Image: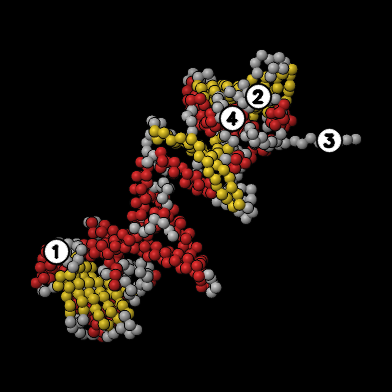
């Protein structure tokens, strides 16, 4: 006795695994299927319900289902067999077999009726395998057409029924079908879609699109792969200003361009239509038709070309098109590029090397930083080769050394840019009426407050160039050995007071004291006082007193610390007319400054001490002028990275 088994498919479980979709997606799928079946006329009629309380208000009508009628091939034997074969793929028609299951995600019942000249084919398609029915009835029909009736919304989607709005439906349907409609027009095939006898979508009214072909390469551990892509596009100036860009598979819109491939901000009134097609997309469309089984960054044996690979090439091509059609964009792009270089001049060579991309200022900076960090990591790995491999080829040695030097120059440039931010911050502090001298002190070196509970965790000896911005005085003060803030030097002075009667100490200590180890035994020392920046002119005498204070402090430290060579004292203040007159009356020497007020200089022979009285605004101007020399060099970096 022969026993046979019939394979059953649990359609319900398969449908449950499909991702959440739009309520209207079954409509889009069904219309595309009609077009795939060579229909030239498609008519759609919606079933509507209204709230009982508002049954007389048409604008409250909700979509409860719809019927689609077309004059296509219908469910002949070939198409019926394809429909009943689970996951059958007909690449010529673009059918993956999952579209009909998407129908059942939203509707519990779908009835298909195909009228042929000699028969009717009726299919009741539902979630339960045993309840699916197929009937053929021999009849004579004068009209050949197919109807698909969608009814009985699923419980999952009963609360998601959209309000019936024929304009909204028409616009969305056209947007979804646009790739298909345009591709049909390219091949001289026309279709007319009628919605409730009121709205018509026709590809005859759609514009001609240009097409650009390009290749994308991908690779993984298994092979190198190449795929062809076709970019269809149109850019026009009109009142619409719509931008539609999307990836297409089998002539169907799948998803908009991802962030990496999105177009830049365009002038108002520019309408853009772009869609990207490829057999590679056709082979990798997901079951829910809303995505691809292609990873964003990681190549696999099944999908060796990533979305990033595609986007990188796509971005280059779309930017070329925009530059050609909208030359005014180049001016906007050049401005954003310049702003980026001004913000991060040390990355100018990366920004300048990208001559075809369109980006906003933020993206110019972001991508330049990412590329620099990538290069930095690579050159550090390469440099280890020099240290570990004595037999490295000379050409490779020279390449690595050249690249290592280039990265080092950029690191230096980053520091110069940091300095410029400090200068701007100092300028802003002077403009603020609420600024205190302690805040200005913190620009030069962090103020250490003896009452601060976290004092033990704060550095009092600084060992990094970014810990103290002493270059504001002069770059020669950068290579210091130790820097002490006022709390630390106060401790030193208290100890001196116990042992010395040479001077009676007043209550004012230097704000900053810096030690320079010029040789193995001796130091040069500089002290800095920030004085009377915000005092009224009537109190300007306090500025003169500060000169005596700094000389007193210098004498005490020199008398008690024997291994000091040169001593430099700086008073940073806001010089007014009365103070400059007093300084000049006391034979203070004028020194050049790019600011409006010169520096004033005294030399104390007995203490071998050089004292400078510096106007804060002149100090800022001089620091800015020195730093801008380096910034100008950075901004004029070569356009190409050799």
Local crowd size for mark 4, using a 10 Å CA cut-off: few (<14), some (14–19), many (≥20): many
Local crowd size for mark 1, using a 10 Å CA cut-off: few (<14), some (14–19), many (≥20): some
Q: Are marks 1 and 4 in contact (CB under 8 Å)?
A: no
Image quarter for residue 452? Answer: bottom left
Q: Nearer the viewer, mark 3 or mark 4?
A: 4
Q: Position of residue 238 (x, y in %)?
A: 39, 31
In the foreground, 605 or 49? 605
Q: Considering only order in the chain, which callout, 1 or 3, is on the residue closer to the N terminus?
A: 3
Q: Where is residue 403 in the image (x, y as percent from the top left)?
A: 45, 64
The residue carrying mark 2 is 73
Numbered badge on residue 4: 3
Q: Which of marks 1 and 4 is in front?
A: 4
Q: Nearer the viewer, mark 1 or mark 2?
A: 2
Q: Considering only order in the chain, which callout, 4 or 3, is on the residue closer to the N terminus?
A: 3
Calculate the distance from the C-alpha at mark 1 to the C-alpha at mark 2: 95 Å
Query: Residue lying furthest right in this view?
Result: 1
Label 4, secondary structure: give it. Answer: helix
Calculate the distance from the C-alpha at mark 3 to the C-alpha at mark 1: 108 Å
Image quarter for residue 33? Answer: top right
Calculate the distance from the C-alpha at mark 3 to the C-alpha at mark 4: 38 Å
Indicate left or right for 511 with 153 as reference: left
Q: Do the residues labelled 3 and 1 touch (CB within 8 Å)?
A: no
The residue carrying mark 1 is 576
The residue carrying mark 4 is 32
Label 2, secondary structure: give it. Answer: loop
Label 3, secondary structure: give it. Answer: loop
């Amino acid at each position: 006795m022969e026993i046979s088994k019939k394979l059953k498919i649990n359609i319900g479980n398969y449908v449950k695994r499909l991702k959440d979709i739009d309520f209207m997606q079954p409509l889009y799928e069904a219309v595309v299927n009609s077009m795939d079946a060579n229909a030239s006329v498609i008519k759609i009629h919606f079933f509507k319900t209204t709230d009982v309380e508002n049954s007389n208000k048409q604008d409250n009508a909700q979509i409860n289902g719809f019927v689609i009628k077309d004059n296509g091939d219908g469910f002949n034997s070939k198409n019926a067999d394809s429909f009943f074969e689970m996951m059958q793929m007909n690449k010529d028609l673009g059918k993956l077999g999952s579209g009909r299951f998407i129908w059942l995600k939203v509707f519990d019942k779908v009835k298909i009726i195909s009228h042929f000249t000699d028969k009717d084919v009726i299919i009741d398609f539902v979630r339960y395998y045993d309840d699916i029915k197929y009937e053929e009835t021999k009849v004579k029909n004068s009209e050949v057409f197919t109807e698909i009736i969608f009814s009985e919304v699923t419980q999952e989607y009963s609360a998601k029924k959209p309000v019936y709005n024929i304009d909204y439906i028409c616009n969305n349907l056209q947007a979804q079908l646009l790739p298909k409609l345009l591709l049909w027009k390219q091949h001289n095939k026309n279709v007319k879609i009628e919605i409730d006898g009121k709205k018509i979508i026709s590809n005859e009214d759609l514009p001609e699109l240009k097409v650009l072909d390009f290749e994308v390469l991908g690779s993984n551990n298994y092979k190198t792969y190449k795929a062809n892509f076709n970019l269809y596009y149109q850019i026009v100036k009109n009142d619409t200003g719509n931008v539609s860009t999307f990836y297409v598979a089998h002539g169907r819109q799948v998803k908009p361009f991802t962030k990496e491939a999105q177009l830049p901000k365009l002038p108002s009134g520019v309408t853009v239509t772009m869609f990207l097609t490829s057999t590679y997309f056709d082979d990798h469309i997901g079951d829910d038709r809303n995505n691809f089984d292609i990873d964003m960054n990681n190549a696999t044996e099944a999908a060796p070309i990533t979305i990033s690979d595609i986007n990188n090439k796509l971005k280059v091509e779309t930017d070329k098109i925009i530059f050609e059609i909208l030359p005014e964009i180049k001016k906007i792009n050049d401005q954003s590029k310049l702003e980026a270089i001004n913000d991060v001049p040390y990355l100018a060579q990366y920004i300048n090397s990208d001559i075809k991309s369109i980006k906003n200022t933020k993206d110019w900076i972001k991508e330049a930083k990412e590329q620099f960090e990538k290069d930095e990591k690579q050159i550090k790995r390469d440099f280890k080769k020099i240290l570990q491999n004595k037999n490295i080829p000379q050409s490779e040695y020279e390449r690595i050394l050249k690249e290592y030097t280039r990265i080092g120059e950029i690191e230096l440039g980053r520091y110069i840019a940091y300095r410029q931010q400090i200068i701007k911050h100092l300028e802003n502090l002077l403009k603020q009426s609420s600024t205190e001298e302690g805040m200005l002190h913190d620009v030069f070196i962090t103020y250490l407050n003896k009452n601060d509970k976290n004092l033990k965790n704060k550095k009092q000896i600084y060992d990094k160039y970014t810990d103290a911005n002493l270059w504001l005085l002069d770059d020669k003060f950068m290579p210091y050995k130790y820097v002490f803030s006022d709390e630390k030097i106060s401790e030193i002075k208290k100890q001196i007071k116990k042992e010395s009667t040479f001077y009676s100490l007043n209550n004012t200590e230097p704000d900053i004291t810096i030690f320079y180890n010029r040789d193995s035994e001796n130091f040069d020392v500089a002290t800095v006082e920030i004085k009377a920046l915000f005092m009224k002119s009537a109190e300007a005498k306090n500025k003169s007193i500060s000169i005596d204070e700094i000389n007193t402090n210098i004498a005490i430290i020199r008398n008690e610390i024997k291994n000091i060579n040169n001593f430099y004292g700086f008073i940073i203040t806001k010089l007014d007319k009365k103070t400059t007159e007093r300084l000049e009356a006391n034979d203070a020497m004028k020194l050049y400054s790019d600011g409006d007020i010169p520096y004033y200089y005294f030399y104390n022979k007995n203490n071998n001490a050089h004292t400078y009285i510096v106007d804060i605004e002149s100090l800022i101007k001089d620091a800015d002028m020195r730093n801008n020399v380096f910034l100008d060099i950075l901004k004029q970096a070569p356009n190409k990275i050799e």
